[in-house]
Image (tube, rainbow, N blue to C red):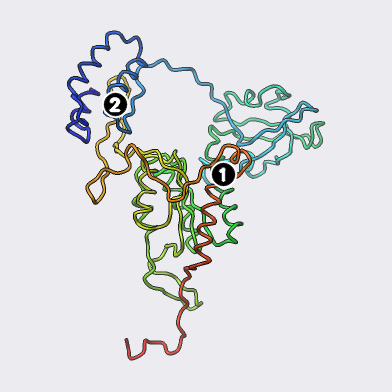
């Protein structure tokens, strides 16, 4: 099936110059020597890998499944009080309790737990160092647990609180990182520059764009961050909004001017990217630059834009993906694939700087946009005097 689907649906009918029949015969000869579905996945990946192209994924199937132990999470970082042999709540990730996928258990109404409080027990089981706190939350999903907390390790103001753990903290931690970056940009720019992060170009990225872009449309500048972007398919939707150009103005009785078209950002922009910006995370910054929206700052992207439509299922619930289309430029030359998108301003975030809390790429973007705002501010034109109320000579 994998060989035949690639023969019939791969974007290049010439199979990148490979003798595809020979490839099929070569790899099919190994099937008798395979001992597991994992071996078969490896063999399939080697066969499609002969095409030297991105998005040739293979996985799943009739493989042994490791037993997973469901473990609840609180959305916190624990600290250790070595002297007392106790754990305390070092950081609570606030999330957004209006959205279930961003729910943070310890910030829900009525939960009297703050950073610095000590966790003494879970469901009556005492917690002391060196016991891993997570071990007391095994099999706690889809139910509530009772936490015994106190203001200090000696048990001051000891009390029980009931919470419902969550299955995944990634959204909470990512939101905290986004909020931290936005606060940094806001402080460094004196409130002039907005910050927008897109984790992918899919459903979550679309939700992030809607929730972040529109509250910041009156900023004088915007930093669009697609570092670590997983890809997807919404780049054209996002770019359409970012490309809106001011062509007119309106005003109401209160004298509040509004741009035409509405919901647009009239200001300077820059885009952050790195080597984890992948697929549509490659495509977005490429066209961000093509449209002249601003410079690309960071590192060269992943370099994979041969597109897929999803998973093609195999008979035992395995899957493969098939690159069915590719990008080329107006000069009829292939673009991005196997190279990536080069930044205009190359900046590497060194591990030591990141551990120290420094983001050199973000700092560079802030400086660039601020310099643009200072040298060439893009402000909305004020409304004309109310009298006379019509254009001169009726025009």
Of helix, strand and loop, which one carries label 1? helix
The spot of residue 117 in percent (x, y) is 74, 37
Residue 74: which disc?
A: none
Say above or below: 85 vs 371.
Answer: above
Q: Is residue 34 left or right of residue 301?
A: left
Classed neighbour count for the residue bearing mark 1: other residues with Cα under 10 Å, few (<14), some (14–19), many (≥20):
some
Q: Quadrant of the C terminus?
A: bottom left
- Front position among marks 2 and 1: 1
Q: Quadrant of residue 333?
A: top left
Of helix, strand and loop, which one carries label 2? strand
Q: Quadrant of residue 175?
A: top right
The spot of residue 389 in percent (x, y) is 41, 87
The spot of residue 310 in percent (x, y) is 31, 34
Residue sitting at 27 percent across and 20 percent down? 315
Q: Earlier in the sequence, mark 2 or mark 1?
A: 1
Q: Nearer the viewer, residue 367 or 130?
A: 367
Q: Is residue 282 left or right of residue 131?
A: left
Q: Which residue is mark 1?
A: 177
Say above or below: 134 vs 156.
Answer: above
- Distance CA(mark 2)–CA(mark 1): 36 Å
Q: Nearer the viewer, residue 284 or 126?
A: 284
Q: Quadrant of the N terminus?
A: top left
Q: Nearer the viewer, residue 376 or 242?
A: 376
Q: Which residue is mark 2?
A: 313
Say above or below: 287 vs 125.
Answer: below
Q: Nearer the viewer, residue 167 or 384?
A: 384
Say above or below: 21 vs 242.
Answer: above
Residue sitting at 33 percent across and 28 percent down? 57
The spot of residue 52 in percent (x, y) is 29, 30
């Amino acid at each position: 099936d994998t060989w035949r689907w690639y023969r019939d649906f791969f974007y290049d009918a010439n199979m990148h110059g490979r003798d595809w029949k020979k490839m099929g015969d070569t790899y099919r000869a190994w099937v008798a020597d395979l001992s597991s579905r994992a071996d078969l996945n490896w063999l399939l990946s080697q066969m499609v890998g002969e095409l030297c192209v991105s998005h040739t994924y293979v996985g799943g199937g009739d493989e042994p499944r490791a037993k997973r132990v469901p473990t609840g999470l609180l959305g916190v970082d624990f600290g250790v009080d070595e002297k007392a042999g106790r754990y305390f709540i070092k950081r609570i990730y606030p999330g957004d309790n209006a959205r279930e996928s961003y729910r943070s258990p310890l910030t829900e109404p009525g939960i009297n737990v703050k950073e610095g409080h000590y966790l003494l027990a879970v469901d009556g089981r005492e917690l002391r160092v060196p016991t891993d706190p997570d071990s007391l939350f095994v099999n706690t999903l889809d139910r509530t647990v009772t936490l015994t907390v106190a203001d200090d390790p000696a048990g001051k103001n000891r009390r029980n609180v009931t919470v419902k753990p969550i299955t995944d903290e990634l959204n909470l931690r990512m939101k905290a990182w986004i909020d931290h970056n936005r606060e940094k940009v806001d402080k460094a720019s004196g409130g002039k520059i907005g910050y927008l992060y897109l984790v992918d170009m899919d459903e979550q990225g679309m939700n992030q764009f809607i929730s972040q872009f529109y509250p910041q449309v009156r900023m004088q500048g915007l930093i669009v961050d697609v570092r670590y972007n997983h890809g997807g398919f919404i780049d054209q939707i996002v770019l359409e909004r970012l490309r809106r150009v001011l062509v007119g103005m309106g005003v109401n009785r209160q004298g509040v001017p509004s741009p035409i078209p509405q919901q647009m950002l009239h200001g300077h922009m820059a885009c952050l990217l790195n080597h984890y910006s992948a697929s549509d995370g490659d495509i977005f910054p490429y066209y961000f630059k093509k449209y002249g929206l601003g410079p690309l700052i960071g590192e060269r992207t992943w370099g994979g834009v041969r597109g897929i439509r999803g998973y093609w299922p195999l008979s035992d619930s395995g899957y493969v993906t098939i690159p069915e289309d590719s990008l080329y430029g107006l000069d009829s030359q292939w673009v991005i694939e196997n190279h990536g998108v080069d930044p205009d301003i190359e900046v590497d975030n060194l591990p030591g700087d990141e551990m120290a809390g420094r983001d050199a790429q973000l700092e560079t973007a802030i400086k660039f946009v601020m310099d643009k705002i200072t040298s060439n501010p893009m402000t909305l034109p004020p409304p004309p005097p109310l009298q006379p109320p019509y254009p001169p000579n009726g025009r």
